[in-house]
Structure formats: structure tokens, C-alpha cells
Image: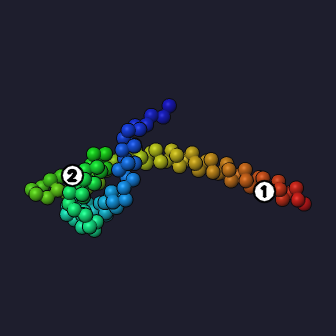
């Protein structure tokens, strides 16, 4: 029986459903860490709005926040996407096998039709 932490998976996918949060994660992939101000710069939104997005990402464990003085730093949490990646990989394998079987079936039917028309 495959065990899956559905609540964590649901929360990760909910966090990733927002394009702003996905963009924030993409920016953090190329950086060791960013301050909230640096992270907010390209989005044209208020700092409280950025903090809310960061809080959602941190609550599901996708990023980690650390405060040094008055600066809040954000970095990607290593391995945080493993639950989602494992789930996606299982489903990718299932659909790949299913689509391969469908392609073989369609090719066989096409050959039968070609042979029947000769």
C-alpha cells in the first residue's frame, strides 16, 4: 500500500497554485538567499503582501525565513518538494505506461486497417 501525506501534498500544491509564489521560488533557486525587500522588488506589491506569500511558502516548508537585525532573509528549504516530486513521478510513470499502451494499440489498429484495405 502506498502511503501518502495528503494534507502536506494538498498544502504544497495550494501554495504552488499561485503564480507569484512560483515566481518567488524561481527567483530563490538562483540565489543563496534574498531579503524580503529584494524578493519583493519585481512584483510591484506592498511588503505586507509579499510577507503573506512568503508566510504561505514557509508554512508548507518550501522556504525558510531568518531574521538578522531588521532584515528578514528567505531561502529555499532543501528537499521541501520531495513529497510533491515523488507524487508527480508516480503519476508520470503511470501515465507514460498508459500512453505507451494506447500508442501501441492505435498503431496495431492502423496496421490492421491498412492490411484490410489491400
The answer to whether residue 71 of the structure is visible from this angle is: yes
Helix, strand or loop status at disc 1: helix
The residue positioned farthest toward the left in the image shown = 69
Q: Residues within 10 Å of mark 2 (few under 14, many from 20)?
A: some
Camera-side residue of 28 and 10? 10
Horizontal side of 45 relative to 18 (left or right) equals: left
Quadrant in which the C terminus appears: bottom right
Q: Is residue 29 above or below residue 56?
A: below
Q: Cα distance, mark 2 to mark 1?
A: 57 Å
Could you say where residue 60 lies in the image, as x and y percent from the top left? 31, 45
Q: Residue 50 appears at what percent x and percent y?
A: 24, 58
The quadrant in which residue 76 appears is bottom left
* Residue at 57%, 45% in the rendered image: 94
Query: Which color scheme does this rendered protein use?
Result: rainbow
Q: Is residue 75 left or right of residue 97?
A: left
Q: What element does badge 2 sit on?
A: strand
Q: Is residue 51 above or below residue 4?
A: below
Within 10 Å of the Cα at label 1, are there few (<14), some (14-19), or many (20+) other Cα atoms?
Answer: few
As drawn, the label of residue 79 is none
> Does 29 sit above or below residue 65?
below
- Residue 21 at what x, y percent from top left? 33, 57
State the residue in front, 34 or 57.
57
Residue occupying the point 28% across, 54% down: 53
Between discs 2 and 1, the one toward the N terminus:
2
As drawn, the residue found furthest toward the top would be: 1
Residue 74 appears anywhere in the view: no
What residue is drawn where x is 71% and y is 52%?
A: 104
**Residue corresponding to mark 1:** 110
The residue labelled by disc 2 is: 65
Residues under numbered marks 2 and 1 in contact, where contact means CB atoms less than 8 Å apart:
no
Amino acid at each position: 500500500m502506498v502511503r501518502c501525506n495528503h494534507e502536506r501534498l494538498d498544502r504544497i500544491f495550494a501554495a504552488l497554485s499561485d503564480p507569484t509564489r512560483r515566481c518567488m521560488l524561481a527567483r530563490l533557486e538562483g540565489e543563496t538567499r534574498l531579503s524580503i525587500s529584494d524578493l519583493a522588488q519585481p512584483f510591484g506589491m506592498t511588503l505586507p503582501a509579499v510577507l503573506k506569500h512568503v508566510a504561505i511558502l514557509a508554512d508548507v516548508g518550501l522556504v525558510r525565513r531568518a531574521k538578522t537585525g531588521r532584515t528578514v532573509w528567505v531561502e529555499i528549504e532543501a528537499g521541501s518538494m520531495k513529497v510533491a516530486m515523488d507524487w508527480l513521478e508516480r503519476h508520470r510513470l503511470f501515465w507514460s505506461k498508459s500512453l505507451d499502451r494506447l500508442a501501441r494499440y492505435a498503431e496495431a489498429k492502423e496496421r490492421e486497417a491498412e492490411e484490410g484495405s489491400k
